[in-house]
Image (cartoon, rainbow, N blue to C red):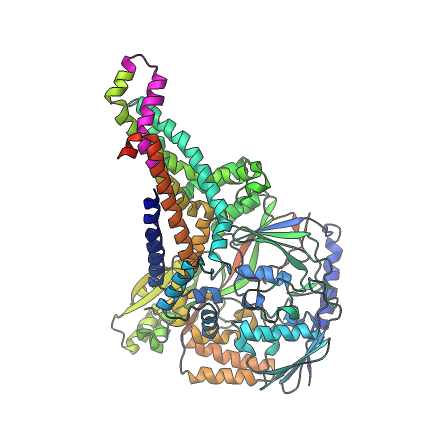
Amino acid sequence: MAVKFLQAVPVVVIISVLAFLLLSLLPGDPAVIIAGEQASPAAIEQVRKQLGLDRPFFEQLAIWLLNLAQGNFGSSLILHQSVLSAVVERLPVTLSLAALSISFTIPVGVLLGSVAAYYRRTWIDSLVMTTALLGVSIPAFWIAILGVILFSVQLGWVPSSGFVPISQGVRQWFASIALPALILSLFQIGFLSRMTRSAMLDVLGQDYIRTARAKGLSEWRTVGKHALRNALILIITATGILLSAAIGGSVIIEQVFALPGIGRMVVQAILARDYPLVQGTMLILGFTFVMINLTVDILYTLADPRVRHD
Amino acid sequence: MRRWVARRGVVLALSLIIGVSFAAIGSAQAQQPKKGGTLVYASVSGPGTLDPYMASSAVELEVIHNLFEGLVTLDAKNATRPMLAAKAAASEDFKTYTFELRKGVKFHNGQEMTSADVKASFERYRRISPAAKNYEAIDHFETPDPYSFVIVLKEPNVVLFDIIKSPIYPLMILPASQKDKPARDIEVIGTGPYKSGEWVKDSHLVIVRFDDYVADTSAPGRDGYGGRKTVYLDAVRYRFMPEATTRIAALQNGEAQLISSVPSELSARVTQRKDLAIREVFPVLGSYIIVNSQKGLTSNVLIRQAIAAAINVDDIIEGAGGLNKRNPWMSFPGTPYYLGETAPTPWYDIKDPAKAKELLKQAGYKNEKIIIETNSNYQWMRSTMLIVAEQLKAAGMTVDVQITDWTTNASHMQQGTGDWNLSTTAFGPDHILGPQQWRPMIYTFPHIVGNETLDKAYSEFFTAPTLDARRASWLKIQQEVLGGAYLVKIADTGRLSGYSKKLQGQNDYAGVLQLWDLWLE
């Protein structure tokens, strides 16, 4: 496990350097954005100098890597605060969104996928899979706007936007994040139910399932214990992917629901060519994704002891 | 001759007293201001900085103008009126400007504002602001007593008041303790009617009523950015909502009482409710086609004029959407430099493809490609340039439309980089403040180099002693800029804001958001 952890370090560094290089290839000048649309060339030049953007490209890269080695992720050009503090401030929002959406997704997605597999080629299967297809296909942006109009304006169940930290009350926190998390989970539920159905179909045709039924086990124990347990590897893999996708997918959801999370911050940073902020966030998110994969690896060994021996 | 700005204020004050008195008779019963409550204002995004000397975007300025004040400012007619100064005067040779400060004005930290604070503010501004170049002519400052401040210039500048009152990169007065603070790193302490509260980036910002605010009693009520400001609200909470649909939803379900930037195609969602309304804020910007005078084909004035001749403004206004009105001038009607109803050049909206073809023939045009660059971030810009492309094609031009992002597009326009002949953008305060504010834009965006007529007209402007003489110079400048088709004017544009009818006290002044004299029923 320690080896896997160490393998992650160069991956993360490569991600961040690539982000630096890709950003620098983009045309556009952050000084123009920061100085304002109506700034004179002299004003833009002054901003560029103040921000150190007048230095050669490799000098900027070297300074950033040197600072990184000292644990300094740099300072955002548009937020005027350290990248680390900017990310830490927004992390609870994005994690809340991702965690809640995953907590909606896993039980619903696994249940729907299992039901669809069990009632294979019946109207139930068709209904579940059609619904899953809709979940995967409908653009999150569109369904989010419909969600706001229905649940906030028409029904008045939840606020239209904004985030309340959990420290200010669990109920208020849940109200602020429930609809965005639900919208985010629609795609995930569609994806996970299809994956679960596929895995379960494979398992339900195995000899040991037939044996379990032959020895008189109830359908609930046969499917719930023997089949599902053996389908777990695929489900865990899908969940790891979905958690990463939830963090990535939060970009659109945070935008529509005005949630002050990392996704929204990154979009603004890219548009403003805020190199330190994009690089730092890429680095931190890259590390997060590596950790998710590491966790998935650990869960494999718990779900299937054979993995440990391999 | 000494030019007392305060005098204009007195005349205006008298007229306002008369006007307001008549208005008050009719509405006093119905609209008695109520103190208290928190106004929630949903805007597109939050400020990057609250350092006024670094602030140029609307989202920054609409917070800053409620927290800070300057020596002089724009009145409701966009003329100069004192704000923290009781009087402001220029010497006959326009080399010495004297400000008599109002006494007893308090900063949010409780300290009284004095000339030492004013001097420190000017010094910091000259050190860090992107607009510091406007103050290059300053020789030194004098503070003969705590309530007098003098600016001594190296050379005459007839428009220094106009520069100081600019609402963009505003020269607000900060406590002297902020003098050495780096750019964007101040403590947010001003003399304005609100003081800063909680600020969570990307989420919300709160400003609260400054109970020790000392209002300018020289006016009976508010007057543009100045005058007697009264704050009825306990606090204002800015909430940052990038999506228009979400802002409208917040207004509809009562989470917000005021929202910015309502797209015209969504305005019916607001007006269909009896308790909500739309306010037209107009004019805010002027939209232009920018012609790159240093790039291939468009370095030829005949080609540029052919482009201008092919433009049909009405089609663009209809196609681009939003709130637009025709205006051939580079100043808004009602501002000091607006020169009248007729166009300054023969090119405005002549929609004459035949004339364009004739000019192309004279220029020896051989179907070379004219490159239009626009962006995907601003729909009105993209729509405008797609319509322009069709109009140019109809006049026999070969056109290539390239769509990029706004950051790239803006960089290309401002720096002359990239491969483009035409683009578009809009300009704001320049239309109010006039030629001195316009100058960097005029030279920068179309990349005008070596135009002696324009240079001479600007030299005349900066030495013209009277407003009439400066207006004459401004006519020559516009004739050169629009006549030479460096810029092609499209229209004046405004924006729509949505509000709950519980919010009372809004007026028609189209400046940056002002939160004084508003109350909630």
**What's the magenta bit mostly, secondary-structure-wise?**
helix
In front here: B274 or B438?
A: B438
Q: Position of residue B443 (x, y in %)?
A: 44, 76
Q: Is residue A208 above or below residue B411?
A: above
Question: For residue B229: magenta?
Answer: no
Q: Position of residue B498 (x, y in %)?
A: 56, 51
In the image, taking residue B343 as reference, residue B21 lies left or right, namely: right
In front here: B242 or A291?
A: A291
Q: Is residue B69 above or below residue A217?
A: below
Indicate the quadrant where residue A118 lies.
Answer: top left
In the image, taking residue B78 as reference, residue B364 lies left or right, namely: left
Q: Position of residue B7 (x, y in %)?
A: 71, 76
Indicate the quadrant where residue A117 lies.
Answer: top left
Task: Report whether residue A109 is seen.
Answer: yes
Task: Report whether residue A257 is seen.
Answer: no
Indicate the quadrant where residue B13 lies.
Answer: bottom right
In the image, taking residue A20 as reference, residue B96 lies left or right, namely: right
In the image, taking residue B466 as reference, residue B287 lies left or right, namely: left
Question: For residue A220: magenta?
Answer: yes
In front here: B454 or A126?
A: A126
- Residue at image coords 61%, 63%: B187
Q: Position of residue A18 (x, y in %)?
A: 33, 57
- Residue at image coords 56%, 75%: B126
Q: Which residues are magenta?
A: A213-238
Q: Quadrant of the N terminus of chain B?
A: bottom right
